Amino acid sequence: MNALIGGMIGLFAGVMAGIAGVGGGVVMVPAMTEILGLEQQIAQGTSLLAILFTSVSGTWVNVRNRRGDLKAALVIGLAGLVAAQFGSQLALATDQALLRRLFGLLVLVSGVRMIVRWARDRRSADAGPA
């Protein structure tokens, strides 16, 4: 892997994770498959490992600024810990082309939901107080 390009991908993903609250994988996985030419499963596994570091960093800032619900994070995190074992095995057993399409669909659906939510919030703000 080209360390310079990998570093640039990490910097961009970290900024996007901090600004938008995304896990960074939405940025890193497509970048690693398209720019670095990694297989989908390798990119996803690498992204999960890299997100560990961005998550710790982002968590530190949010905890310091009292922006987070520790109880909710523990419940969600523990459930995710268990489910990630199953999901990782499923990803390894899934054909790379299908996995890419499923990942793309996930990103697309997430993007559409964000646009719909933004539009709804904007309409509410434009309507003003009732």
Image (cartoon, helix red, strand yellow):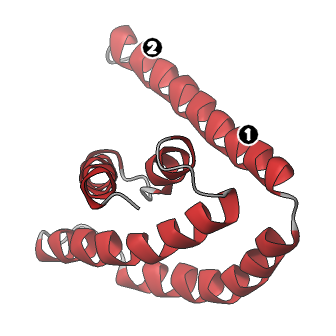
Dot 2: what SS? helix
Which image quarter is the C terminus in? top left
> Residue 32's spot in the image, x, y percent?
50, 52
Determine the image quadrant of residue 94.
Answer: bottom right
- Residue drawn at point x = 72 percent, y = 82 percent: 83
Viewer-side residue, 39 vs 121: 39
Residue 43's place in the image compared with 48, above or below, is: above
In the image, what residue type sits under mark 2?
Arg
Q: Which mark is residue 37?
A: none
Which residue occupies 78% across, 48% down?
A: 102
On screen, residue 36 versus residue 128, left or right, reads right
10 horizontally vs 90: left or right: left
* Image quadrant assignment for residue 88: bottom right
Is 88 displayed left or right of 7 in the figure? right
Name the residue carrying label 2.
Answer: 123
Instruction: Give the labeled residue for mark 1.
Output: 105
Residue 106 percent coordinates (x, y): 69, 45
Q: Nearer the viewer, residue 14 or 36?
A: 36
Residue 50 in the image, given as x and y percentages of width and height: 40, 71
Which residue corresponds to the image point at 34% horizontal and 45% vertical from the top-left?
20
Q: Residues within 10 Å of mark 1 (few under 14, many from 20)?
A: few
Measured in 3D between alpha carbons, the distance from the residue under mark 1 to the one under mark 2, in whole angstroms, is 27 Å
Dot 2, crowdedness within 10 Å: few (<14), some or many (≥20)?
A: few
The first of marks 1 and 2 along the sequence is 1
Q: Amino acid at mark 1?
A: Leu
- Looking at the rendered structure, the secondary structure element under dot 1 is helix
Query: What residue sits 62% from the left and 80% below the top?
Result: 80
Q: Position of residue 98 (x, y in %)?
A: 85, 49
